[in-house]
Amino acid sequence: MPLDRENGEVLNGLKASVHVAIPSRLLAALTRYRCEYQGKRKFYAASQKKPTRPVFDDAVANAIEAFAAKGALRPIRFNDEDVVVQVYPKDLKVAVIFQRSIAGTVYYAPSYYDLPKPVLDALLEAAGKRVPSEH
């Protein structure tokens, strides 16, 4: 079943009615805001900076690892139909959900990120969308 990129998906732990689905290309273009990730080296000197990468790149890497663990053959590639990005303005979060069919079973790989309000507002503005009102 394809992901609902218009209305988004219901995710555990986040309110379903207070999110906005945006095109994934907008988050992919957000390369200046970065998140930390576990690099290949497990120990870092106090003076060394921890490795960072753009949020969308981190979500893609997490999805590739999750699908490889389920048995997907590498290289694992995604297209626009395989991803939905949901902004939760009231929770200051963004969720990136990937889907993949492996041996006839559909698997999902969600990643969640805390983003500052100005970044979320910029994503919503770029998408031409507004914050939904709660019912």
Image (cartoon, grey):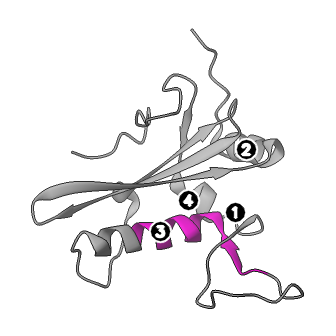
Q: Pick the residue in front: 37 or 131.
A: 37
> Label 3, label 1: how many angstroms apart (C-alpha)?
17 Å
Q: Say what amino acid the circle numbered 4 marks.
A: Arg
The residue depicted at 20 percent of the width and 54 percent of the height is: 106
Neighbour class for label 2 at 10 Å: few (<14), some, many (≥20)?
A: many
Mark 3–mark 2 contact, CB under 8 Å?
A: no
Question: Residue 83 at x, y = what percent?
Answer: 41, 55
Q: Which residues are magenta?
A: 50-64
The label nearer to you, 1 versus 4, is 1
The mark that comes first in sequence, 3 or 2, is 3
Q: Are marks 3 and 1 in contact (CB under 8 Å)?
A: no
Tag 2 residue: 120
- Residue at the spot 83% in from the left edge and 45% down from the top edge: 118
Q: Which residue is mark 1?
A: 30
Q: Which residue is mark 4?
A: 25
Residue 79 as seen in the image, left or right of residue 62: left
> In 3D space, how far apart are the residues under numbered discs 1 and 4 (Cα atoms)?
9 Å
* Residue behind mark 3: 62
Residue farthest to the left?
A: 104
Residue 80, percent from left and from top: 40, 59
Residue at x-position 52% and y-position 55% = 24
> Is the residue marked by circle 4 packed among few (<14), some (14-19), or many (20+) residues within 10 Å?
few
Snapshot quadrant of residue 3:
top left
Q: Secondary structure at mark 2?
A: helix
Q: Earlier in the sequence, mark 3 or mark 1?
A: 1
Q: Mark 3 or mark 1, which is nearer to you?
A: 3
